[in-house]
Amino acid sequence: MFKVIYLGSHVERKDPLQGAVSRQADVVQIFLSPPQAWAAPKIRGDEHELLSAELPIFVHAPYLANPASANPAVREKTRRCLQEQTTAAAAVGALGLVVHGGHPTGGGTVAQGIDNWLEVMRDLEPECRILIENTAGGSAAVARRFDDFARLLDALRGAGHDVGVVLDTCHAHAGGEELSSSAERLIRFAGSIELVHLNDSKDDFNSGRDNHQSLGEGSCAMQDLLQVVQVANTYTVVETPGGYVDQARDLSVVRSSLG
């Protein structure tokens, strides 16, 4: 059990340590390469500094990575991307690489998406633990509905893959999962939650749309957001809009609310 609540934010790759200071963050999440591209991470020269820092770091994979894709070319690019990202994440001492659950394209099914994940992971040698994040949209998404997410985890772990989970509150709400009990239900089938993405949602419950909002300004009840933090009892980062000033405010609100 955590004796201290670790609250932080997604920060810019340019200077993660200063990004943490400006937000008074206890933990950070970063991209190591552009999120909308397949480009491999580049060596920036601060890897040893980040590795040696006491600041906990998580890395988010590019959004293009989709292990559930029905397209073999996308799956191959995803496998290569995840190999490159886990190697670079290990170099900065990351606690995990966050990967969206994804979905099969076209008329694919959840079962096919899970099989595609198994194919991608079969040839992967991750140097950092892969953490799968629940998603907001897609009728065949493998991690939108928690029942499907449980099937994915069972399949991957049954095949010997040590994967963890990330709970995004905006995604859960927009994906049609009751936020107040989401952390408890996820822990029930996953065993633990490695990271919480604490985001409000611009859109309504079960909208299927992934649009983050600052805490207390969207359609998620603040008491439900706080409930997730308390029950998950793990590292928590905000990915809310507005830059470091607004994100620092979000973290302050959570700290003061939790006492």
Image (tube, grey):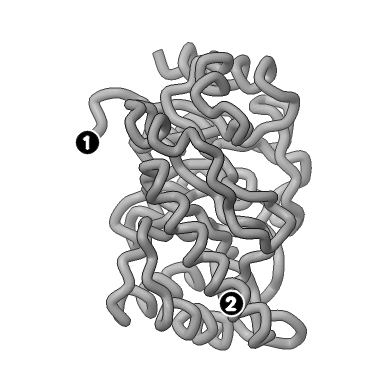
Q: Quadrant of the C terminus?
A: top left
Q: CA distance from mark 1 to mark 2?
A: 33 Å
Residue type beneath disc 2: Ala
Neighbours of disc 2 within 10 Å: few (<14), some (14-19), many (20+): many
Percent of width and height locating residue 66: 62, 70
Horizontal and vertical percent for residue 174?
Answer: 68, 52
Question: Does residue 94 appear anywhere in the picture?
Answer: yes
Q: Position of residue 57 (x, y in %)?
A: 43, 37
Identity, as a three-letter code, of the amino acid under mark 1: Met
Q: In terms of depth relative to the viewer, which is nearer, 81 or 178?
A: 81
What residue sits right under mark 2 in the picture? 68
Q: Is residue 41 left or right of residue 119?
A: right
The dot on residue 1 is: 1
Q: Residue at x 59, y 77 (%)?
A: 68
* Badge 1 element: loop
Q: Quadrant of residue 37?
A: bottom right
Label for residue 125? none
Image quadrant in which you'd find residue 242: top right
From what the image shows, is residue 49 above or below residue 18?
A: below
